[in-house]
Image (cartoon, rainbow, N blue to C red):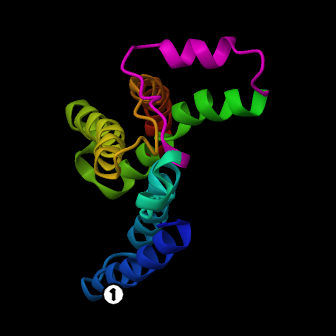
Amino acid sequence: MLDLDFLYIVSFLIYILFLVIFLFKKFSFRKIIFCTFFYFYIVFVLGVTFFPIPISWLKEISIYYTNTNNYIPFSSIFEIYLNNNLPFIVKFKQIIGNIILFIPMWFFYPFIFKYINHLKYTLFIWFFSSIFIEFSQFIISLFLWFSYKVTDIDDVILNTFGFMVWFLIYKLIKKYYY
């Protein structure tokens, strides 16, 4: 099983490489700090959305197999919200967690990349990021021959709502930052 320890070790080694490149290219201290926080945020998102990956699936396929992918908009949102047997923390994690998952990403982008001020680039990056995660979970599940993570269109919908929240916050902050 590829667990979070594997992700953290590999990502730390990659970060050291990036840090050497940043220092060699004489990036400003401010940009290095923002890039560092952004990088480890991305590692966090990868950890939440992809890990652990059960690679020893030949022995354990019957343990993990579920067919819970959702391609019907709002289906899992209503199912989670209306399920009285789920504790509040589970509902919060599933619904609010998907809304706020991308907000830090959008906080870092304007400070690292100048072109983020254009809405069309921002929408493209958001769309690519959200769809990439769901599609990658689906592809990994195909290679494993079972759904190890749920591919859910509602995650994309909630990420979109989170994007709209970020966009409103960004517009308010931008007035004071520039």
Identified at 40% across, 14% down, the residue is: 73
Verify whether residue 123 appears in magenta. no
Identified at 42% across, 40% down, the residue is: 147
Most foreground residue, 178 or 67: 67
Question: Taking 15 as reference, is 83 left or right?
Answer: right
Q: How many marks?
A: 1
Q: Point out residue 66 in the picture as x, y percentages from the top left corner.
A: 49, 35
Q: Residues within 10 Å of mark 1 (few under 14, many from 20)?
A: few
Most foreground residue, 41 or 116: 41
In the image, residue 23 sits, relative to residue 151, either above or below, namely below
| Corner quadrant of residue 151 | top left
Identified at 78% across, 20% down, the residue is: 85
The magenta stretch is: 63-87
Q: Point out residue 35 in the picture as x, y percentages from the top left corner.
A: 40, 66
Most foreground residue, 29 or 17: 17
Q: Amino acid at mark 1?
A: Val
Q: Point out residue 98 in the picture as x, y percentages from the top left corner.
A: 53, 34
Verify whether residue 71 appears in magenta. yes
Most foreground residue, 85 or 175: 85
Image quarter of the C terminus? top left
Overall secondary structure of the magenta section: loop
| Corner quadrant of residue 170 | top left
Mark yes or no: residue 151 visible. Answer: yes
Mark yes or no: residue 38 visible. Answer: no
- Identify the residue under disc 1: 20
Q: Point out residue 87 in the picture as x, y percentages from the top left corner.
A: 79, 28
In the image, residue 72 sits, relative to residue 94, either above or below, namely above
Disc 1 on helix, strand or loop? helix
Identified at 70% across, 32% down, the residue is: 90
